[in-house]
Image (cartoon, coloured by chain):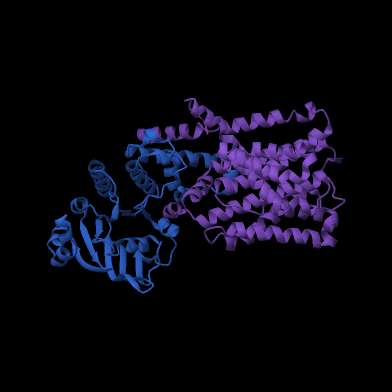
Amino acid sequence: MVEADESVRRGTVLVARRPSDHVWLILIWLALLTIPFIAPNAYVVSLANMALINLILIASLNLLMGFGGQISLGHAGFFGLGAYASGILNVKLGLSAWLGLPAAALIAGAAALVIGLPALRLRGHYLSMATLGWNAILVVLFNQLVDLTGGPNGLLGVQPFSLFGIRLDTEPRTFPLVWLASLLIMLAILNLLRSRLGRALRAVATNELGADAIGVDSFCTKLLFFVLSAGMAGIAGSLYVHVNQYASPETFGISGSILLIVMVALGGSGTYWGPLLGALIYTAVPQLLLDYEDAELMLFGLGMLVVLIVFPGGLANVPGAFMRRFGLKGRS
Amino acid sequence: MTAKLLQVDNLFCHFDGVIAVADLSFSVRAGEIKAVIGPNGAGKSTLFNMIAGVTRPSAGQIRFDDERIDHLPTFRRARRGIARTFQNLQIFRDMSVLENVMVGRHMRSAAGMTQAILHSSALRAEERAIAAAAMDLLDRFGLASKAQTQAGTLSFGQLKVLELARSLACEPRLLLLDEPAAGLPHAEADRMGEIISSLNRDGMTVLLVEHNMRMVMSLSHDILVLNNGRRIAEGTADEVRRHPEVLAAYLGEAEDA
């Protein structure tokens, strides 16, 4: 009995030494809370809103791709599906944004389930191809279903979130909502990664044969995280459409999906904090390149090549690499 | 008579007309160590893969605990109680040594998605139990000091032991060991032999494929000899050693070496 107690106590120590990421998460989000107060103008707050929505997108893609080894080329499509679902429910049926948000998550998740059921049964790059096709079809639908989506002109007249009769229609008013949503998503991802499901996901990503042999259902594990990842993108879409009160098809194209993958890699694929850097770059760099809009994608591509050649693990691994370089013990 | 844990009946396997296993029947009794030996190409690996669920048999039946398992995917067989190690190691290299063993507890734990996302107290308690059980296994095999090390950095011998620890985390009733001593230096191979026999003393049923004759002869209660996909002999080490067909097909070659 004494031995059993001892081993449980040690288990406690092993598990308990980890909440430091939780602490960091809370500290960082508390710091972010000051943005509306220190931002020089509403434009900067709107960028912060966009960055946090992008963070949800990049972090959810990183969960699937960085930790699960499954590449989705349709993440912007799930984002768009969430945006249009929530937006159309609001514009056509008058459904509140608060109901549109979970609806967007469910619809994007359900779409992922339908795609994942056949595509994830096969090993290899089938998911990439299926999601690429899926994104292409969605863009056509967003453009062609003019009665529903407004077509190329975009979906107009989307109502913002409102709380106790206050419309969250200015940047400082939407910020707390986006702040909270991104915090909850980041928390959910961290908790998932720290659970048996997260471990199973990483195991399947590194060695499916080995995972199968110890009773992990690879297919269900991949499907679960694909659906979760798409559902989170749907949430980002709903936030996007009600914050901007508008959506248009070009936001959700394949180039968007590719850029999201680039941001996952740039930040550090398979690192928990990488998406934070990815979202920062994804939001800030286009602002810096406003004058060179046509070259944006090319410059992103070049930037990614340079970063990934110099730091193959992405930017989140740079501090660790430096510490190892100078003989200090690095934390991953 | 002891109960038969694994029962193989009239098993066939052919790939594009090449027969790998032909009309093979044998059983593994609960509590024994059974070895499968034979020259290269005898069909040992194919047999192993059919039992583990990696290769589909062309005909025949495999029963575990009196239930047919030959239609089940690998992970379901693992959940029934068949765990395996691999000849060429299938380790989660990017994960820590401890996490590798913790994944082995996956099927012995239950927390679902909602509990995971909410980080519920039930989940935390389960996580502590998983970590403790994994740590106990690492302790038992002398890997406790490496618990937080990335698995990919371990030596080959340590990885073999880690993979064994990971499969034991599943609490299997039948352990399939695919060449546990292959590639190990003498001393480490002997240590592996001691580990296997100590597991067996604690009641574990073991089916192993192995080329190291010293290990096979000293460990096994029962030996199945294959050649060209067929059984040519079955029995104790002494019986097999004297069997004329075995001498001709297998040990004859070995003695020359």
The location of residue B216, given as percent across then percent down, is 21, 53
Left or right: where does residue B213 sit relative to residue A282? left
Chain that appears purple: A
**Closer to the camera, B238 or A98?**
B238
The location of residue A77, given as percent across then percent down, is 70, 54
**Closer to the camera, A91 or A71?**
A71
Can residue A93 be seen by looking at this rendering?
Answer: no
Left or right: where does residue A176 sit relative to residue A263? right
For the C terminus of chain B, the quadrant is bottom left
Q: Residue at x 50, y 55 (%)?
A: A218
- Above or below A39: residue B40: below
**Closer to the camera, A201 or B110?**
A201
Query: Could you say which quadrant of the image residue A273 lies in?
Result: top right
Left or right: where does residue B164 sit relative to residue A216? left
- Above or below A219: residue A322: above
Chain that appears blue: B
Q: Residue at x 36, y 61 (%)?
A: B49
Query: Could you say which quadrant of the image residue A47 lies in?
Result: top right
The location of residue A30, given as percent across then percent down, is 69, 29
Query: Could you say which quadrant of the image residue B56 lies in?
Result: bottom left
